Amino acid sequence: MRRLVLVSSLLVACGGGSGNNPDGGGNPDATTPPTDGSTPSDGASNDGNDGGPNIGDSVITRSNHNTRDNVFIQSTFTTAGIATMKLDTTFDGTISGDVYGDVLFFNDGPSGQPVVIVGTQNNQMTALNADTGAVVWQKTFGTPAGQSGAGCGNIGPIGITSTPAIDPVSRTIFFNATQGNANTITDHQIHAISMDDGSERPNFPVNASTATSQNTTLNPVLENQRSALLYLNGVVYVAYGGHAGDCGAYHGWVVGVPYPAGAPVAAYAASTAANTRAAGIWGVSGPASDGTDVYVTTGNSFGATTWVGQEAVLRLTPGPAFSNQTADYWAPHDYLTLDNGDTDIGGTGALLVDVPGATPSSLVVALGKSGVAYLVDRGNLGGVGTSTATDGVSNMQVAGGEIINAPGTITTPNGTYVVFHGYNGAAGQSCKTGSGDLVALQISATSPPKISVPWCAASNTAGSPMITSIDGTNNALVWTVGTHLDAWDLASGKQVYTGTDTLANVRKFTSPIAAHGRIYIGADNKVYSFKP
């Protein structure tokens, strides 16, 4: 099971189109080495005893690990231990601006104090004391755009939209701050700042508009940066896609910026064939990694009559670069139908899952806006399917509506699970095998692995689920946040915590994080903290 990944890995991706970035409005409506193919960065340990950074239970990337599993180890978070969980009303947490990404946590912040890191659409980055919520430092990075200037979009102002990433070794925070004026975006700036005081690192910021791929240059006006950043092996990966409404000739981009050099910038752009566009990369969890390669999902394309990178899982090698070999991409056989229906594969980022005993055991889970879950062989993605039977190693219709969120996965004594939030089912019933918008999948340890749906529950939120465990395997609990914080037992689907504290202005897709014996949640102008 994946534990704390010490390789600094972060991922940023951008919003897509009308189905590509449905953000308008919020939801008011003791660690062990990683086992996901990554290695401790620079020999750093978790506790600082070898001279490395004091990582502890730091949360340095969206969904906590490069695989995007959304698992957080908290030894006291048993069913009994969370019974007294309450909103800490003494926690200040005041910030300025709308929060669309998740907060992060660093155990060894300025002067050794633990801090919560959060970015807002006002282009404000803040470090808060993790116990009191008081501001430790706060910086603003340029002027956000009042609107996209592309002719569509549903976010305004447009500043820091995605979740940042942290390199614990160099104590650096990476994020994308959109720049502009009242009428348009002028650029996307990729920043690297000090954990200790928010000061900019040398050679940064880097403008995304310097990125080129396949004779195409990134147009910042047309691109939205919605996906979380990924920092991996000395490169900051930032993904981009279009604005809500699918206007303009945007493409799905992954830009790679070397750190600390800042240049030269490498990039990959999807769907650049003649008369095609889109294939946005905008799933909020951001690019995923196995410790070496980068995995992304793409959205719908326009003007395509053949496969040009859309509706797919792509494996990018470091840089990034794309081989265009079938081992490094997968798309379902009906990708053109998905195109025409705006039913993106890319609404949810790639989720890397290992299933002990299965053949193949190393998988990518793709969750489509069509409500279908796909299991794809990570060793050989396999190219474009030829029929439903060849769409991955297996697939299943698991939701009655769209799946657009950041899922989670964990292997427990009962098996390997994936949990996600579904939308728009008939009468609000998204689960195809029961009632509720919170859906649990189980992946069998068979050849090939198969999908089943052991339970569904009514979370009545638009947030993305988080999983906590006392050790990475046992006592797994699933948490969601909207106007309240709630939790379910993963094995049974029974609700074990029902929040009574009302939370305001928590945006859709938001996941809580668990660290420092607490739960932290980002919201507009506020970070909330819960503790037993």
Image: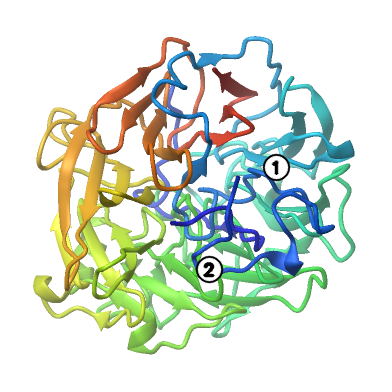
Q: Position of residue 180 (x, y in %)?
A: 70, 47
| Residue 431 vs residue 185, the one in the foreground | 431
Residue at image coords 31%, 63%: 355
Q: Secondary structure at mark 1?
A: loop
| Local crowd size for mark 1, using a 10 Å CA cut-off: few (<14), some (14–19), many (≥20) | many
Q: Position of residue 361 (x, y in %)?
A: 30, 71
| Mark carried by residue 144 | 1
Asked whether disc 2 touches disc 1, contact meaning CB atoms under 8 Å apart, the reply is no
Q: CA distance from mark 2 to mark 1?
A: 21 Å
Q: Amino acid at mark 1?
A: Pro
Residue at image coords 28%, 82%: 382
Picture layout, residue 25 above or below residue 52 = above
| Local crowd size for mark 2, using a 10 Å CA cut-off: few (<14), some (14–19), many (≥20) | many
| Mark carried by residue 253 | 2
Say which quadrant the N terminus sits in: bottom left
- Say if residue 423 shows up in the picture: no
Residue at image coords 49%, 17%: 85
Left or right for 352, reference 86 = left
Q: Amino acid at mark 2?
A: Trp
Residue at image coords 71%, 28%: 130
Which of disc 1 and disc 2 is earlier in sequence? 1
